[in-house]
Amino acid sequence: MEGKIIVVTSGKGGVGKTTATSSIGAALALEGKRVAIVDMDIGLRNLDVVMGLENRIVFNIVDVVQGRCKIDQAAIRDRRIENLFLIPASQSDNKNVLTSTGVERIAKELRKKFDYVIMDSPAGIERGFENAIISANEAVVVCTPDVSAVRDADRVIGLLYARSLEPKLIVNRIEPVRVERGEMLSHEDVLEILSIDLAGLVPMDEKVLISSNTGTPLVLQNDSTAGQAFRRIAKRLNGEKIPIEIPNRKTSVWSKLSKTFGLR
Amino acid sequence: MINFDNTAPVKLKGAGSGLWITIDPSHPESEIIAEIDRLFEKIKHLAINVDIVLDTGDVGGQEELVDRIKSHLKSNFELGTISTSPKKRSIPTERRRQRDLSRGWNHHKSDVLMLRGRVRSGQKINAGKHLVITGDVNPGAELTAGGDIIVLGTLAGKVHAGYPKNDGAMIFSLVFNPSLVKIGLITATGASEPGTQGPEFACVEQGIVVVKNYMKENPFKRMPWPEVI
């Protein structure tokens, strides 16, 4: 059976596309699937650093599309998670070096070799984005609860619909305390505008930064709330029916008790 | 398009190479003449040698008033020919009402563009005449219509009714929160504060765009009869 290509996109930059891509890919591999993560952000690659594989790059996706190497030569195997591979982007080219037909041809091959191919789209809606979505079977839109991120996500959702892709939404970096104080949009506010199916809600978690900087997979950290959220998202994308968990403000036993007894 | 209770005593609009003046004889003559003077003062040299058509709308039997206004115009402004409106060829009101009573609008070919669903950021919708959207219009979307715009949902984004210069058009939505409103040639930016809860509509009054609560100031409330638009 042929694998599935899932594109992770957002429109706006800096909302957590790369973190989401690497985490979903790693989580799917932990589910026993053979997964390739493809960095389509040509010229501004990041996934290799986030996944801690930057020192092992020999070939990249541009080399594969232009026929300088085979997929197996460019795919870097992750040593910590079995069945997880990264095909990095080129850092020296620009987004126009890839043609849509070239990407489609490689996507076809990737589908034969892997159960899931997770493509990290660049920010924006230009050529790089077009190339990333051209062969996708499914799309995931990452959005933070900011007005500007929501507007860009909305635009991207429209473009994906135009390509007959029905995207699922990840609301990233939710801060329940700030939502409660009315300083941040809630996930309901975001859904109200974007009105697409939810893949999952990811809370703000400082471990994401540490994980990205050290190149360690977030989903392997059991104490990372974001990592666990991405594991649940991966399971949903894999077809499991798991209820959406809404990030809550952490409450200690003492505060719960004092609330119960009306002390505060 | 909107049948407001307080109609202006004088309306001035371009008709071919001339001007069409519609006067409402229910207002006192002095008020009508003062308004005509004000309007012609405003357009100044643009009215020189322009042909004028004087129209009293549906109200008949106003020949004397029309004559007095005609002579006032002749003596005070350098205009071209001044004529009265030709007899309307449209069916009389009574017949029209009879037709409406028997649902004559069933035979009316509508120019309304009606869409359902969500209009997303970056999407542009252009309608030749009226535009009805059953769904929400997101921030970053753009709507343009030659006539009215009705949104049965939340209206955000840019919206232009009465394109290009029909300032009699209106914009209605259940939640009115656009970033920019344009009716005909008149523009207004969105309010920084969200409006009142409930349906609202925007229209042009005295040269500016005003937003009103639809339930309190429904402009069609006093229309005795449904009318095809």
Image (tube, coloured by chain):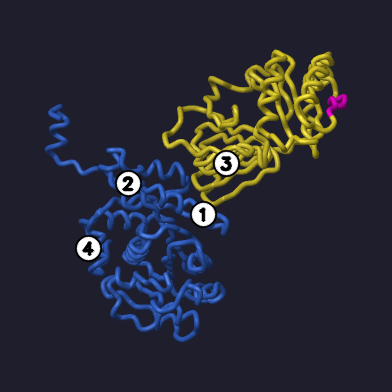
Chain colours: A blue, B yellow
**Seen in the image, is A33 located left or right of residue B121?**
left
The alpha-carbon separation of the residues under discs 4 and 1 comes to 33 Å
Above or below: residue B121 compared with residue A52 = above
- Residue B164: image x %, image y %? 67, 42
The alpha-carbon separation of the residues under discs 2 and 4 comes to 24 Å
Callout 3, which amino acid?
Val
Q: Helix, strand, or loop for circle 1? A: loop
- Please state which of the two labelled residues, at mark 1 or mark 3, is closer to the viewer: 3
- Residue B107: image x %, image y %? 81, 31
**Seen in the image, is B213 located left or right of residue A235?**
right
Above or below: residue B218 compared with residue A88 = above
In the picture of the structure, the residue carrying the numbered disc 1 is: A166
Residues under numbered marks 4 and 1 in contact, where contact means CB atoms less than 8 Å apart: no
Q: Which mark is residue B159?
A: 3
| Most foreground residue, A176 or B176 | B176
Callout 2, which amino acid?
Glu
Callout 4, which amino acid?
Ile
The alpha-carbon separation of the residues under discs 1 and 3 comes to 27 Å
The alpha-carbon separation of the residues under discs 3 and 2 comes to 38 Å
In the picture of the structure, the residue carrying the numbered disc 4 is: A210
The alpha-carbon separation of the residues under discs 3 and 4 comes to 45 Å
Q: Are the residues under badges 2 and 4 in a single subunit?
A: yes
Letter of the chain that mark 2 sits on in the rendering = A
- Please state which of the two labelled residues, at mark 3 or mark 4, is closer to the viewer: 3
| Most foreground residue, B202 or B113 | B202
In the picture of the structure, the residue carrying the numbered disc 2 is: A245
Which of the two labelled residues, at mark 4 and mark 1, occupies the earlier sequence position? 1
Which of the two labelled residues, at mark 2 and mark 1, occupies the earlier sequence position? 1
> Is A35 one of the magenta-colored residues?
no
Letter of the chain that mark 3 sits on in the rendering = B
Letter of the chain that mark 4 sits on in the rendering = A
